[in-house]
Each structure stands twice: as C-alpha cells, then as structure tokens.
C-alpha cells in the first residue's frame, strides 16, 4: 500500500514550488490579452500563456481577484510548468458547448510514450516485463483477443479487452504494488511513458462550471483538467457547479486522471452533480450521473483531506468519484459521496474518511483496507453485481462505522449479487478472507417493522437455497470471516446472512 508516493516528498515539492516561483518571473494570462473581467472569453489567452511558459520553463500565475470566463471550446492549455491560480476564479460556461471533449487544461508529460517491442507473452505475477524501458515508466498493456468485465444488467455490454497498468523500472522490473493480474498468451500492445522526475505543482483557484443543458444521454463532457503526467500534486483547487436543470448530459470528471502514476490531490473541494435518468443498453430506464473526479488506467493516485460541497447523504446527487483499471488508490481524510471501482482496482486504502449514501463500491484484486471511516448507507461494502460481485483477495474494515438511513429493510456489511448464470469474462469470487475489527453498526434510526437486524453478508443468490441449484459459472463465497469488537447500536444481533446455505462452508469466528 502506498502512503502518498509522490517523489520528491510533498514538503520538498512545496519548497521547490516556492523557490521556483520566487526566482523565475511567472507568466501571466494578462500578458497574452486576458481581461479577467468575467465577461470576455479568455480561453485563447490562457492557452497562449501556458504555451509560452512551457517554451521558457516558467511558472504561470493567475491574477488574484480576476474572473476568467471561458465559453468557447477550441484548444486546450497544455500545462508543463507549475501553476498558481491564487484567488482567481474561472467560469466555464457549458450552456452552448458543442465540442464535448474540450478540457480547458491538459497536464501533459514531458516525454512521449514509446511502444515496447519484443515481449510475446506474460504470466500473472511475473516480476519483470523482460524488456528494457527508457527509464522508470508507467506501462499500459492489453490483448484484444480476450474480453473481461462483460457487464450484466441494464447497462450490459460485450466487455473490454484484457488490459492493465504497471509501474516498471528501466530494466523492466515491475513495481510490487502494481503486479501483473492476468496471463497474456499473446499481447496486442505495450506502451511505456517515462515518469517525470520533478513534481509538478498546481495550486489554488476557484472553478465554476455552468452546467450544460443537453439531452440526458451518455455523451460525457470533459471541460476541466485532464491529467496524463506522472508525479503531479494538485492542492487547494475548488470546483463548483451551477445552473443544473432537470436534464443534462453527464460529465466525465472535472479532474480526469489517466495513463499516469503518482498523482496526489490534496485539500481540494468538489461538487457532486444532479442524478438524471436515461435509457440503458438493455432498453430500460437507468439512473445516469456525472463524476467530478474520474481516474482511469492509473496507479498510485491519492486523495488527501478533500471534500465535496453537496451533502454526501443527499440522494439527488450522483457519486463524486469513479475509477477503472487502476492500481493502488488512496483516500485519506476525505468526505465524498462514494468510492467506486468499476472495472477493477488492485489494492486500495481508505482511511479517516466519510463516505455517503452510495458507499464503497468495488471490484478487483489484492488487499482492500478501510480504517477509521464512516459510511452512511445500507451496506458498508457493495461488491458490484454488474461486474460479478468479485474481489480476488482480502478485505479488512478496522475501527469503522456503518450509519444507516431511516428506511433500512436490508442491512449488511457486504452486499452484492451473483447467480452464477452470466459469464463476466473471469471467475468470480467474494473476498477470500474478510476481517471486521472494531466495527459499529448504528441502526438506531431503523424504524420499519420488518427490519430483521444487520447481516454480515447479504443474500447474494436468492435462488440458491439447497444443493439442487446448479451454477453455470460457479461463484465462490468467502472462505473465512473474522469479527472482533462488533457493536450494533439497536442491540440486535449481527447475523451471518439471510441465506445461510450459501455461506455454509464459510469459517466464521466472532458471531
């Protein structure tokens, strides 16, 4: 597990930022024609300022108190030097935007990625790529001949190519925190992007998105920050959303982090978007929402001491954070409406945090640790049923609380569903071992008459009541569950599951 992972350390990075800013006269937006009056479109000036800063290796400094207005959608400011937005405000007006993928800022790597040649196959757990790299690199590899994450349900699909991300040294040695998860008998492609040695720092600024008014369809807007550089620190950024209607297209992350490693987001404030509805791929109505934070194909990404403006328990707003194909994610000191690993995370940690009504949603591998954290939902962990409710590894909750809503007919520490009838592209299993230590279930507000009390595991297959049920794609329940110091506020007993037959072979201590 990582404990911050940016090199140099945060303290050194801040010191370097201060020294660099003091020595080098920063580039300003005003020098390139920005008005900062909240009315004139300053996009072109912002782009030009960063272009000049990159050419000269100079930092960029926004004018304190200025309001930079952006309505156009042509061009992106490429960020390759430190930026201090100070107390400036940026208004991004999406009411008439046409070009959906038009981020205002792209935090770009210093070197281009290269194709890695000569690697014909790889084995799960293999410790080296067997090829030299141009320094320490972020690596993305895939094979088109095998499909994984074949989604089930209203948003069903045919899956995606087997793939993953790694961090590897110049000699090809794979970082132990980003292990190979799959066997690759063949490989379609491997690309390596050198990890920038210097920490690039972005700090300050208030960003206001005037929400789009498009039709509620899966047409994701990308209008904020795109981060593809490794070794980046984003601190003190505030994002607000205004002008949302009863419809709108979703956003794919005001901050979107992808194809990089060692990114830290600290002391930042975000805003959850309204939940809308649309028609899913199965032809039925589904809830559709936006992400203010999106992390895809990334490793060692940390969110520290950050929060959201909207109430994390307000059902009108979608979950703030979503991820795909990541390794080693960290929440520490955060207050978000949810943690969500869609198409897998390998190793993750949540500490000293509060998560809202959408809770902890996960699919993946390795070790998942949640410590000193409160979740306001009907379940503490939700193993996503649309991806097979699978976790290949162990899950631990230590010194945590589950605070339940007023309506709580079904309450469980682990929820999910897998009837063994769908091929997800991999064998599915619950965590091999779960440890629940120093855990409080606050069900004091459960007023419904049919409330039966909390369960460790929900009913993952309502049809499996005896040995007559046959799974086409067998689902492996948890092998061992260890409970210590579990308290239920109402005084009710924590039971194993409403479907004890399914967990008949689970070794349980503490109930």
Image (spheres, grey):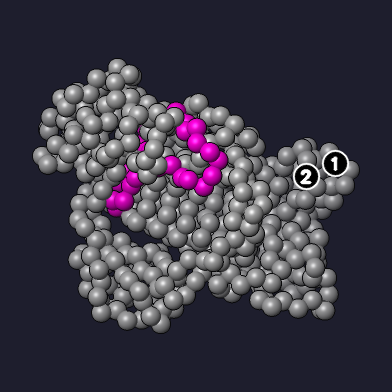
Residue 124 seen from this side: no
Task: Please report contact status of discs 1 and 2: CB closer than 8 Å, yes or no.
Answer: yes
Judging from the image, what secondary structure is the residue with disc 1 in? loop
Given residues 397 and 114, the one toward you in this image is: 114
Instruction: Write the residue at 38% across / 64% down.
Output: 165
Q: Position of residue 343 (x, y in %)?
A: 51, 60
CA gap, disc 1 and disc 2: 7 Å
Q: Residue under label 1, please give it.
A: 448
Q: Where is residue 180? Give x, y as percent.
A: 41, 72
Magenta-drawn segment: 209-236
- Number of numbered tags placed on the structure image: 2
Asked where in the image residue 137 lies, by quadrant, the reply is: bottom left
Question: Residue under circle 2?
Answer: 408
**482 and 260: which is toward the camera:** 260
Local crowd at mark 1 within 10 Å, few (<14), some, or many (≥20)? few
Q: Earlier in the sequence, mark 1 or mark 2?
A: 2
Picture quadrant of residue 186: bottom left
Estimate the x, y position of residue 287 in percent, counting from the top left.
Answer: 62, 45
């Amino acid at each position: 597990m990582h404990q911050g992972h940016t090199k140099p350390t945060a303290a050194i990075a801040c010191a370097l930022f201060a020294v660099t800013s003091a020595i080098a006269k920063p580039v300003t937006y005003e020098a390139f024609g920005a008005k900062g009056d909240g009315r004139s479109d300053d996009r072109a000036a912002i782009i030009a300022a960063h272009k000049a800063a990159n050419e000269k290796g100079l930092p960029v400094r926004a004018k304190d108190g200025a309001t930079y207005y952006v309505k156009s959608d042509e061009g992106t400011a490429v960020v390759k030097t430190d930026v201090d937005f100070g107390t400036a405000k940026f208004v991004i007006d999406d009411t008439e935007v046409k070009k959906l993928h038009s981020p205002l800022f792209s935090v770009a790597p210093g070197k281009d990625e290269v194709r890695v040649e000569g690697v014909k196959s790889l084995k799960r757990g293999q410790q080296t790529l067997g090829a030299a790299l141009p320094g320490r690199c972020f690596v993305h590899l895939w094979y088109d001949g095998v499909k994984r994450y074949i989604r089930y349900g209203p948003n069903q699909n045919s899956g995606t190519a087997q793939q993953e991300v790694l961090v590897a040294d110049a000699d090809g040695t794979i970082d132990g925190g980003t292990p190979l998860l799959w066997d690759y008998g063949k490989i379609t492609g491997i690309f390596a992007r050198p990890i920038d040695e210097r920490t690039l720092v972005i700090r300050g600024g208030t960003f206001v998105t005037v929400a789009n008014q498009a039709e509620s369809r899966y047409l994701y807007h990308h209008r904020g920050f795109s981060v593809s550089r490794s070794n980046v620190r984003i601190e003190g950024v505030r994002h607000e959303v205004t002008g949302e209607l009863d419809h709108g297209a979703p956003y794919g992350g005001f901050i979107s982090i992808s194809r990089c490693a060692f990114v830290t987001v600290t002391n930042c404030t975000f805003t959850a978007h309204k939940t809308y509805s649309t028609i899913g791929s199965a032809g039925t109505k589904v809830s559709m929402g936006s992400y203010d934070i999106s992390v895809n194909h990334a490793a060692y990404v940390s969110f520290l001491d950050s929060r959201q403006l909207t109430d994390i328990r307000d059902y009108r707003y979608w979950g703030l954070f979503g991820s795909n194909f990541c390794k080693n994610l960290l929440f520490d000191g955060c207050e978000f409406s949810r943690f969500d690993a869609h198409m897998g995370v390998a190793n993750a940690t949540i500490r000293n945090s509060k998560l809202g009504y959408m809770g902890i949603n996960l699919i993946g591998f390795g070790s998942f640790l949640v410590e000193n954290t409160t979740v306001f939902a009907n379940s503490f962990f939700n193993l996503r049923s649309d991806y097979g409710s699978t976790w290949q590894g162990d899950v631990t909750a230590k010194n945590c609380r589950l605070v339940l809503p007023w309506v709580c007919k079904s309450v469980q520490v682990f929820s999910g569903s897998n009837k063994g009838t769908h091929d997800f592209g991999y064998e599915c299993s619950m965590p091999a071992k779960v440890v629940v230590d120093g855990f409080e279930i606050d069900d004091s507000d459960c007023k419904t008459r049919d409330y039966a009390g909390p369960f460790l595991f929900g009913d993952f297959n309502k049809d499996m009541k005896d040995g007559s049920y046959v799974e086409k794609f067998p689902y492996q329940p948890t092998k061992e569950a260890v409970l210590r110091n579990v308290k239920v506020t109402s005084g009710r007993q924590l039971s194993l599951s409403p479907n004890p037959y399914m967990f008949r072979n689970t070794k349980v201590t503490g109930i």
